[in-house]
Image: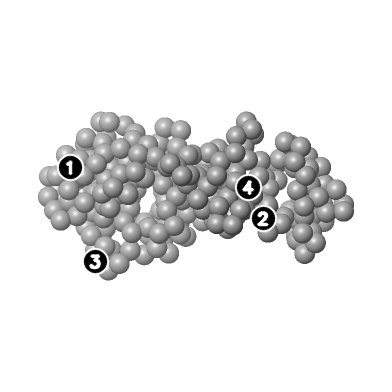
Amino acid sequence: MYNAIILEDELKIQLLIELKVNKLAPDVSIVDKVSTVQDAITSIEKHHPNIIFLDVHLLGESGFDLLEYFDHINFQVIFITGSNDYVLKALKSNAIDYVLKPVSDDLLISAINKAKMKIKEGINLQDYKMLIEKMKIIEPLKRIAVSCKNGYEFVQVENIIRCEGDQKYTKIFLENGRTLLSCQNLGIYKNKLSERFFLCHKSHLVNGSKIQKYIKDGFVILTDGVKIPVAKRRKEAFLRFLHLH
Protein backbone atom coordinates (compact mmCIF):
# COMPACT_ATOMS: atom_id res chain seq x y z
CA MET A 1 0.00 0.00 0.00
CA TYR A 2 1.02 3.57 -0.68
CA ASN A 3 0.01 6.41 1.65
CA ALA A 4 -0.92 9.75 0.08
CA ILE A 5 -1.84 13.28 1.17
CA ILE A 6 -3.82 15.81 -0.86
CA LEU A 7 -2.86 19.48 -0.53
CA GLU A 8 -5.62 21.39 -2.32
CA ASP A 9 -7.51 24.48 -1.15
CA GLU A 10 -10.74 23.69 -3.03
CA LEU A 11 -12.84 21.19 -1.07
CA LYS A 12 -14.64 19.91 -4.19
CA ILE A 13 -11.36 19.08 -5.90
CA GLN A 14 -10.02 17.45 -2.73
CA LEU A 15 -13.01 15.10 -2.66
CA LEU A 16 -12.87 14.52 -6.42
CA ILE A 17 -9.22 13.46 -6.29
CA GLU A 18 -9.90 11.20 -3.31
CA LEU A 19 -12.82 9.51 -5.08
CA LYS A 20 -10.84 9.02 -8.28
CA VAL A 21 -7.79 7.66 -6.45
CA ASN A 22 -9.96 5.20 -4.50
CA LYS A 23 -11.50 4.00 -7.77
CA LEU A 24 -8.44 3.96 -10.02
CA ALA A 25 -5.68 3.01 -7.56
CA PRO A 26 -7.03 0.99 -4.61
CA ASP A 27 -3.48 0.38 -3.39
CA VAL A 28 -3.10 4.12 -2.73
CA SER A 29 -4.64 5.19 0.58
CA ILE A 30 -5.51 8.87 1.09
CA VAL A 31 -4.48 9.36 4.72
CA ASP A 32 -5.17 13.10 4.90
CA LYS A 33 -6.57 16.06 2.98
CA VAL A 34 -5.33 19.57 3.82
CA SER A 35 -5.71 23.03 2.35
CA THR A 36 -2.64 24.96 3.60
CA VAL A 37 1.12 24.45 3.43
CA GLN A 38 1.37 24.61 7.24
CA ASP A 39 -1.17 21.79 7.64
CA ALA A 40 0.62 19.79 4.93
CA ILE A 41 3.95 20.04 6.78
CA THR A 42 2.32 18.80 9.99
CA SER A 43 0.55 15.99 8.12
CA ILE A 44 3.71 14.85 6.31
CA GLU A 45 5.65 14.68 9.56
CA LYS A 46 2.82 12.66 11.11
CA HIS A 47 1.92 10.25 8.28
CA HIS A 48 5.18 9.98 6.28
CA PRO A 49 3.36 9.62 2.92
CA ASN A 50 4.82 8.14 -0.26
CA ILE A 51 2.84 10.47 -2.54
CA ILE A 52 1.69 14.09 -2.30
CA PHE A 53 -1.02 15.45 -4.60
CA LEU A 54 0.10 19.08 -4.57
CA ASP A 55 -1.92 22.02 -5.86
CA VAL A 56 0.42 24.62 -7.37
CA HIS A 57 -1.75 27.69 -6.81
CA LEU A 58 -3.18 27.85 -3.29
CA LEU A 59 -5.08 30.72 -1.69
CA GLY A 60 -2.35 33.20 -0.80
CA GLU A 61 0.32 30.49 -1.04
CA SER A 62 2.31 28.47 -3.54
CA GLY A 63 2.61 24.70 -3.51
CA PHE A 64 6.34 25.20 -4.01
CA ASP A 65 6.50 26.60 -0.46
CA LEU A 66 6.05 23.03 0.74
CA LEU A 67 9.04 21.71 -1.21
CA GLU A 68 11.10 24.72 -0.17
CA TYR A 69 10.52 23.86 3.49
CA PHE A 70 12.02 20.34 3.44
CA ASP A 71 15.79 19.81 3.27
CA HIS A 72 15.20 16.19 2.22
CA ILE A 73 12.23 15.08 0.14
CA ASN A 74 11.31 11.42 0.61
CA PHE A 75 7.94 11.45 -1.13
CA GLN A 76 6.85 11.58 -4.76
CA VAL A 77 4.92 14.67 -5.86
CA ILE A 78 2.07 14.79 -8.37
CA PHE A 79 1.38 18.44 -9.11
CA ILE A 80 -2.18 19.66 -9.70
CA THR A 81 -2.40 22.79 -11.82
CA GLY A 82 -5.30 24.59 -13.43
CA SER A 83 -3.65 26.57 -16.16
CA ASN A 84 -1.32 26.19 -19.10
CA ASP A 85 1.15 28.72 -17.75
CA TYR A 86 4.83 29.09 -16.81
CA VAL A 87 4.42 26.48 -14.05
CA LEU A 88 3.29 23.85 -16.53
CA LYS A 89 6.23 24.62 -18.79
CA ALA A 90 8.63 24.20 -15.86
CA LEU A 91 7.03 20.89 -14.86
CA LYS A 92 7.26 19.58 -18.42
CA SER A 93 10.88 20.61 -18.86
CA ASN A 94 11.85 18.80 -15.65
CA ALA A 95 9.80 15.68 -16.46
CA ILE A 96 7.80 16.14 -13.24
CA ASP A 97 4.40 14.42 -13.01
CA TYR A 98 1.36 16.68 -13.09
CA VAL A 99 -2.40 16.60 -13.63
CA LEU A 100 -4.38 19.43 -15.20
CA LYS A 101 -7.68 20.63 -13.77
CA PRO A 102 -10.33 19.41 -14.42
CA VAL A 103 -8.77 16.13 -13.32
CA SER A 104 -9.22 13.35 -15.89
CA ASP A 105 -9.04 9.64 -15.07
CA ASP A 106 -6.44 8.91 -17.75
CA LEU A 107 -3.98 11.60 -16.68
CA LEU A 108 -4.46 10.83 -13.00
CA ILE A 109 -3.81 7.08 -13.25
CA SER A 110 -0.86 7.71 -15.56
CA ALA A 111 0.69 10.11 -13.02
CA ILE A 112 0.04 7.69 -10.14
CA ASN A 113 1.66 4.80 -12.02
CA LYS A 114 4.71 6.94 -12.82
CA ALA A 115 4.92 7.97 -9.16
CA LYS A 116 4.84 4.33 -8.03
CA MET A 117 7.61 3.47 -10.47
CA LYS A 118 9.77 6.34 -9.24
CA ILE A 119 9.17 5.31 -5.61
CA LYS A 120 10.44 1.81 -6.40
CA GLU A 121 13.44 3.20 -8.27
CA GLY A 122 14.17 5.76 -5.56
CA ILE A 123 13.12 9.41 -5.23
CA ASN A 124 15.15 11.62 -7.58
CA LEU A 125 15.84 14.63 -5.40
CA GLN A 126 17.73 16.35 -8.20
CA ASP A 127 14.53 16.73 -10.24
CA TYR A 128 12.85 18.66 -7.42
CA LYS A 129 15.93 20.75 -6.66
CA MET A 130 16.20 21.78 -10.31
CA LEU A 131 12.49 22.58 -10.41
CA ILE A 132 12.69 24.75 -7.28
CA GLU A 133 15.69 26.64 -8.68
CA LYS A 134 13.87 27.18 -11.98
CA MET A 135 10.76 28.46 -10.18
CA LYS A 136 12.91 30.91 -8.19
CA ILE A 137 14.05 32.40 -11.48
CA ILE A 138 10.57 32.44 -13.03
CA GLU A 139 8.66 33.47 -9.92
CA PRO A 140 10.63 35.28 -7.18
CA LEU A 141 10.31 33.74 -3.73
CA LYS A 142 7.51 35.47 -1.80
CA ARG A 143 7.46 33.57 1.49
CA ILE A 144 9.67 31.27 3.51
CA ALA A 145 8.91 28.81 6.27
CA VAL A 146 10.81 29.64 9.46
CA SER A 147 11.42 26.68 11.73
CA CYS A 148 10.88 27.87 15.32
CA LYS A 149 10.85 26.12 18.69
CA ASN A 150 7.09 25.48 18.73
CA GLY A 151 6.47 24.92 15.01
CA TYR A 152 6.77 26.87 11.78
CA GLU A 153 5.97 30.43 10.86
CA PHE A 154 5.53 31.60 7.29
CA VAL A 155 7.07 35.00 6.65
CA GLN A 156 6.79 37.35 3.68
CA VAL A 157 10.30 37.81 2.29
CA GLU A 158 9.67 41.52 1.72
CA ASN A 159 9.10 41.95 5.48
CA ILE A 160 12.53 40.58 6.44
CA ILE A 161 15.12 43.28 7.14
CA ARG A 162 18.02 41.01 8.04
CA CYS A 163 19.09 37.65 9.40
CA GLU A 164 21.79 37.23 12.04
CA GLY A 165 23.61 33.96 12.66
CA ASP A 166 23.96 32.80 16.26
CA GLN A 167 25.89 29.51 16.15
CA LYS A 168 23.37 26.90 14.93
CA TYR A 169 20.44 29.32 15.23
CA THR A 170 19.33 32.35 13.19
CA LYS A 171 17.65 35.53 14.39
CA ILE A 172 15.28 36.97 11.79
CA PHE A 173 14.44 40.65 12.16
CA LEU A 174 11.14 41.80 10.67
CA GLU A 175 9.79 45.21 9.69
CA ASN A 176 7.13 45.17 12.41
CA GLY A 177 9.82 44.99 15.09
CA ARG A 178 9.41 41.26 15.77
CA THR A 179 12.40 38.94 15.96
CA LEU A 180 12.07 35.23 15.21
CA LEU A 181 14.58 32.69 16.49
CA SER A 182 14.96 29.90 13.97
CA CYS A 183 16.35 26.45 14.73
CA GLN A 184 18.17 26.48 11.37
CA ASN A 185 21.59 28.01 10.78
CA LEU A 186 22.30 31.11 8.70
CA GLY A 187 23.56 29.05 5.75
CA ILE A 188 20.05 27.67 5.23
CA TYR A 189 18.64 31.19 4.89
CA LYS A 190 21.52 32.29 2.66
CA ASN A 191 20.48 29.58 0.20
CA LYS A 192 16.75 30.31 0.51
CA LEU A 193 17.10 34.07 0.14
CA SER A 194 19.95 34.21 -2.35
CA GLU A 195 18.15 36.42 -4.88
CA ARG A 196 17.58 39.61 -2.91
CA PHE A 197 19.82 39.14 0.13
CA PHE A 198 23.57 39.42 0.59
CA LEU A 199 25.86 37.84 3.17
CA CYS A 200 27.91 40.95 3.93
CA HIS A 201 29.52 39.35 6.99
CA LYS A 202 29.77 35.75 8.17
CA SER A 203 27.01 36.47 10.71
CA HIS A 204 24.86 38.95 8.78
CA LEU A 205 22.53 38.43 5.82
CA VAL A 206 20.85 41.66 4.73
CA ASN A 207 17.88 42.42 2.49
CA GLY A 208 19.13 44.62 -0.36
CA SER A 209 15.87 46.57 -0.46
CA LYS A 210 16.23 47.49 3.24
CA ILE A 211 19.65 49.12 2.92
CA GLN A 212 19.31 52.82 3.71
CA LYS A 213 22.92 53.90 3.59
CA TYR A 214 26.35 52.48 2.72
CA ILE A 215 29.34 53.86 4.62
CA LYS A 216 32.66 53.53 2.80
CA ASP A 217 34.61 52.42 5.86
CA GLY A 218 32.68 49.15 5.75
CA PHE A 219 29.18 49.44 7.19
CA VAL A 220 25.57 49.58 6.04
CA ILE A 221 22.65 51.14 7.86
CA LEU A 222 19.33 49.40 7.40
CA THR A 223 15.80 50.79 7.49
CA ASP A 224 15.47 49.88 11.19
CA GLY A 225 18.52 52.04 11.97
CA VAL A 226 20.80 49.08 12.72
CA LYS A 227 24.45 49.37 11.60
CA ILE A 228 25.86 46.17 10.10
CA PRO A 229 29.55 45.52 9.21
CA VAL A 230 30.66 44.59 5.70
CA ALA A 231 33.63 42.22 5.70
CA LYS A 232 36.63 43.51 3.72
CA ARG A 233 36.84 40.39 1.57
CA ARG A 234 33.14 40.75 0.64
CA LYS A 235 33.28 44.47 -0.16
CA GLU A 236 33.78 44.19 -3.95
CA ALA A 237 30.99 41.60 -4.35
CA PHE A 238 28.74 43.68 -2.10
CA LEU A 239 29.27 46.81 -4.23
CA ARG A 240 28.37 44.77 -7.32
CA PHE A 241 25.27 43.55 -5.53
CA LEU A 242 24.30 47.19 -4.93
CA HIS A 243 25.16 48.03 -8.57
CA LEU A 244 27.78 50.52 -7.34
CA HIS A 245 30.75 48.80 -8.94
Q: Residues within 10 Å of mark 4 (few under 14, many from 20)?
A: many
Disc 4 marks which residue?
A: 163
Position of 15 relative to 31 (above/below): above
Q: CA distance from mark 1 to mark 2?
A: 50 Å
Q: Of residues 134 and 141, which is closer to you in this image?
A: 141
Q: Earlier in the sequence, mark 1 or mark 2?
A: 1
Disc 3 marks which residue?
A: 120
Disc 1 marks which residue?
A: 20
SS at mark 2 in the image: loop
Residue drawn at (40%, 36%), measured in percent from left and top?
Answer: 58
What amino acid is labelled 4 in the image? Cys
Q: Earlier in the sequence, mark 4 or mark 1?
A: 1
Q: CA distance from mark 3 to mark 1?
A: 23 Å
Find the residue positioned furthest to the right.
216
In the picture, which quadrant includes the N terminus? bottom left
What amino acid is labelled 2 in the image? Ser
In the picture, which quadrant includes the C terminus? bottom right
Q: Earlier in the sequence, mark 4 or mark 2?
A: 4
Q: Earlier in the sequence, mark 3 or mark 2?
A: 3
Scheme of colours in the image = one colour
In the image, taking residue 165 as reference, residue 76 lies left or right, namely left
